[in-house]
Image (tube, helix red, strand yellow):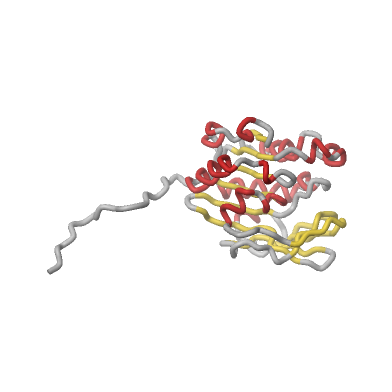
Amino acid sequence: MVRVTVWNENRHEQKNPVVKEIYPEGIHGTIAAFLEEGGFPTRTATLDQEEHGLTEEVLQETDVLVWWGHLAHDEVKDEIVEKVKERVLDGMGLIVLHSGHFSKIFKTLMGTSCDLKWREEDDKERLWVVEPSHPIAEGISEFIELEREEMYGEHFDIPAPDELIFTSWFEGGEVFRSGCTYKRGNGKVFYFRPGHETYPTYYNKEIQRVIKNAVQWAKPVDRKRPVYGNAKPLERIAIKK
């Protein structure tokens, strides 16, 4: 059983009637619904809840955290970011979606600006599977095609991914590393690009399949975090003359 928390700042849904119409239960509600249908016990958390909904109890009961943010990255408290980071290092999986590339937690774990080019002009997007044997790509054909999406373009200022699963092509000519995995401490991180708030991307069955696959991939391993610092010898050390 993989327990999931879907975090969303939940601001576009309050400010933009187009987003409210597309995602009446919020982006977090839509994602949580298809994860529940996929057999994952799922809860949601939002920015304006106490501790952004990410209390110590919630984090300890979360195996994989899904993160969507955009307008309010700076409003996420640093102490909450630190708690999430420590949980990832301890083994909790983290899936960062779309504009979450600029979230404090993703930038903290990457150690770079995570900046990129962007354009919102109804580009067609093709997400090409470049690592077809990877479990995150299970059940996906050669590519996923989205008729309308926001463009993200290179250069994407991230560390070289441990694994690159998807590369996007956009109608305007740009390409982008759209599905990237990382290991941080005991935890696994997956960045997945699609999901601009004014498009119904999270209703696409193939996009849903990727996110469900990623949750299964990112689940914690049964292993304690290594012990660091000064260490006593495991064997007797002979005194050298």
Seen at 35% across and 52% down, the residue is: 229
x%, y% of residue 192?
68, 53
Looking at this view, is 100 or 177 the one in front? 100
Can residue 135 be spotted in the picture?
yes
Q: In this view, does 130 lie to the left or right of 202?
A: left
User: The C terminus appears in which quarter of the rendering?
Assistant: bottom left
Image label count: 0
Looking at this view, is 239 or 226 the one in front? 239
Looking at the picture, does residue 127 appear above or below residue 31?
below
x%, y% of residue 128?
72, 63
Looking at the picture, does residue 156 appear above or below residue 41?
below
Looking at this view, is 81 or 21 the one in front? 81
x%, y% of residue 34?
71, 39
x%, y% of residue 204?
78, 47
What residue occupies the far left of the structure in this picture? 241
Looking at this view, is 225 or 213 the one in front? 225
Seen at 57% across and 37% down, the residue is: 3
Looking at the picture, does residue 9 appear above or below residue 234?
above
Can residue 42 be spotted in the picture?
no
Seen at 18% across and 57% down, the residue is: 236
Seen at 64% across and 60% down, the residue is: 165
Q: In this view, does 152 lie to the left or right of 101?
A: right
Q: In this view, does 142 lie to the left or right of 200?
A: left
Residue 45 picture quarter: top right
User: The N terminus appears in which quarter of the rendering?
Assistant: top right
